[in-house]
Amino acid sequence: NINYYNNSLVFLGRFAEQKNPLMLIEVAKILKENDFKFNLNLYGDGKLLKDIQKAIKKYNLENNVFINEPTTDIEEVLKKTDLLLLTSLYEGTPLVINEAFSQSVPCITTNFGDSIKTCVPSNCGLIIDNFDPNNYANNIMQLLNNKELYFKYRENAYNHSRSFSDEKIKENWINLIESL
């Protein structure tokens, strides 16, 4: 799916401190201040929900940022998305990245630890090495304003996801068993 959806951004996760969703509201504020056209859909629930709602109202982001109930139909959400955004303070290996890649959706994420380097190859998304909303917002704008690079990231994301296909996993298991 090498399409473009007018800067449609998505966050899928718990509204908890670990996931750092309030940073995304700061990022949205900066995008809006820079007259960058976008929409950000947040899918989730959690103890920070009220704080997120207050921040959206405080920064007049009601026409840009939308809170949605958690969903199990991740594929359907991602089919209409340009970028997956992660702002986690720490993670293990977030499966949502591979789910996004399988739908040709690149990722912009904070550097939450060593596992991120294998989760997001440099040609499939961006890893932001700090938690500065200005830096994060600037990276979103730069990537989405460079359509040639953006579409290459979409293609690369999908191709990377193929390494986790049923066929590839089956092949790896067969090779492992045969090597024993």
Image (cartoon, grey):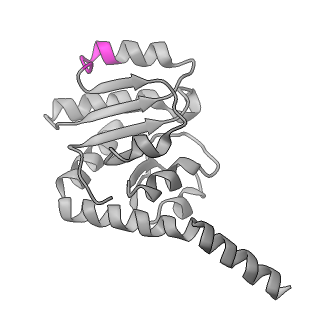
Q: Name the side, left or right, on which 94 lies relative to 176.
A: left
User: Which residue is situated farthest in the right direction here?
Assistant: 180
Q: Is residue 107 above or below residue 46?
A: below
Q: Nearer the viewer, residue 144 or 20?
A: 144
Q: Residue at position x 59%, y 43% from top?
A: 90
- The answer to whether residue 130 is magenta is no
Q: Is residue 127 visible?
A: yes
Q: Give the total number of marks visible in the rendering.
A: 0
Q: Nearer the viewer, residue 21 or 84?
A: 84
- State which region is magenta: 56-62
Residue 176 location, x and y as percent? 77, 80
Q: Is residue 122 visible?
A: no
Residue 2 location, x and y as percent? 28, 60
Q: Residue at position x 25%, y 55% from top?
A: 3
Q: Is residue 42 above or below residue 85?
A: above
Quadrant location of the C terminus?
A: bottom right
Q: Residue at position x 50%, y 32% from top?
A: 20
Residue 18 location, x and y as percent? 58, 33
Q: Nearer the viewer, residue 81 or 118?
A: 81
User: Which residue is situated farthest in the bottom direction here?
Assistant: 179
Quadrant location of the N terminus?
A: bottom left
Residue 177, quarter of picture: bottom right
Q: Residue at position x 56%, y 27% from top?
A: 16
Q: Name the side, left or right, on which 156 lies relative to 139.
A: right
